[in-house]
């Protein structure tokens, strides 16, 4: 840790914290997935879609452990691992944009041994084949073999901005094929409750759609179309006479 001097707080810290979201809420959010949880939270908290999974089908939710690193340097990822435990999701960002491969198989093995569920990184990742084979899910900005050094200080378990989303230690990270969502820990239980209600409503709609009901009718959108001036016209068919030309010779 580096002191800022003149009695100021340190610039680089590793914060030990027990802040943790409601585990039942985490389980619900992980099951319903990003799209439903995002809608249930009022369409907030989603990262920019630049973060993509390295392989399809992964779905996780867990407590955020955050890392703020210097670009091209993974020292603070090494430093954060002892702060991670079962059910956590490691969230890494850098002080300026980076696509370097900051994370690979050796990190994943260490985190998997501690029960960490996956990684969200606003930078690069490598060893994708090995990570996929071991089933360690990662959402990253880039895939790159570019290596990094271990020489620059940063911080662990501080608030960070990851691909446009504000993430605090202890918040809930939900990630799947649709993207990455951060749910503030104090909202997790209510968002989970709303997500379950939304899930039930969608299940009912799916049954109606299977029975042939149109969304246009179920959602009452015919009145909306009429209000916006959208009208229906019947195609006269190929045998209909062509319109007479006007004085300028246009049909």
Image: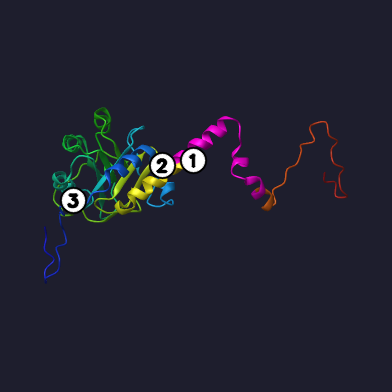
Magenta span: 199-224
Q: Earlier in the sequence, mark 2 or mark 3?
A: 3
Q: Where is residue 43 drawn, in percent x and y?
A: 43, 51
Which quadrant holds the N terminus?
bottom left
Secondary structure that dominates the magenta span? helix
Q: Which of marks 3 and 1 is nearer the N terminus?
A: 3
Residues at marks 3 and 1 touching, judged by CB atoms closer than 8 Å: no
Q: How crowded is mark 1: few (under 14 residues within 10 Å), some or many (20 or more)?
A: few
Q: Which of marks 2 and 1 is nearer the N terminus?
A: 2
Q: Can residue 234 be seen in this view?
A: yes
Quarter residue 114 falls in: top left
Separation (CA) of disc 2 from disc 1:
9 Å
- SS at mark 2 in the image: helix
- SS at mark 1 in the image: helix
Q: Residue at x 18, y 50 (%)?
A: 18
Q: Which of 128 and 1 is in front in this view?
A: 1
Separation (CA) of disc 2 from disc 3:
27 Å
Q: Mark 3 points at which residue?
A: 18
Mark toward the viewer: 2 or 3: 2
Q: Where is residue 216 drawn, in percent x and y?
A: 62, 41
Mark toward the viewer: 3 or 1: 1
Separation (CA) of disc 3 from disc 1:
35 Å
In the image as oriented, which residue stretches furthest toward the top?
133
Q: Where is residue 184 drawn, in percent x and y?
A: 32, 52
């Amino acid at each position: 840790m580096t002191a800022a001097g003149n009695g100021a707080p340190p610039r680089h810290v590793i914060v030990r914290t027990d802040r943790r979201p409601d585990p039942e809420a985490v389980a619900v959010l992980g099951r319903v997935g990003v799209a439903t949880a995002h809608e249930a939270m009022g369409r907030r908290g989603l990262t920019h879609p630049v973060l993509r999974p390295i392989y399809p089908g992964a779905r996780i939710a867990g407590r955020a452990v955050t890392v703020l690193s210097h670009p091209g340097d993974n020292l603070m990822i090494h430093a954060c691992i002892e702060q991670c435990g079962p059910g956590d999701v490691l969230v890494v960002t850098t002080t300026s944009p980076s696509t370097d491969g900051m994370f690979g198989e050796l990190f994943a093995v260490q985190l998997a041994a501690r029960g960490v569920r996956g990684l969200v990184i606003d930078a690069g990742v490598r060893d994708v084949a090995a990570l996929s084979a071991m089933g360690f899910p990662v959402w990253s900005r880039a895939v790159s073999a570019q290596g990094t050094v271990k020489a620059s200080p940063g911080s662990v378990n501080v608030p960070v901005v990851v691909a446009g989303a504000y993430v605090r230690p202890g918040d809930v990270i939900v990630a799947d094929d649709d993207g990455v969502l951060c749910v503030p820990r104090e909202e997790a239980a209510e968002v989970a409750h709303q997500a379950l209600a939304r899930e039930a409503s969608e299940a009912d709609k799916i049954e109606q759609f299977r029975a042939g009901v149109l969304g246009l009718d179920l959602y009452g959108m015919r009145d909306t179309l009429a209000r916006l001036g959208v009208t229906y016209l019947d195609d006269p068919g190929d045998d209909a006479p062509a319109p007479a030309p006007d004085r300028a010779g246009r049909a």
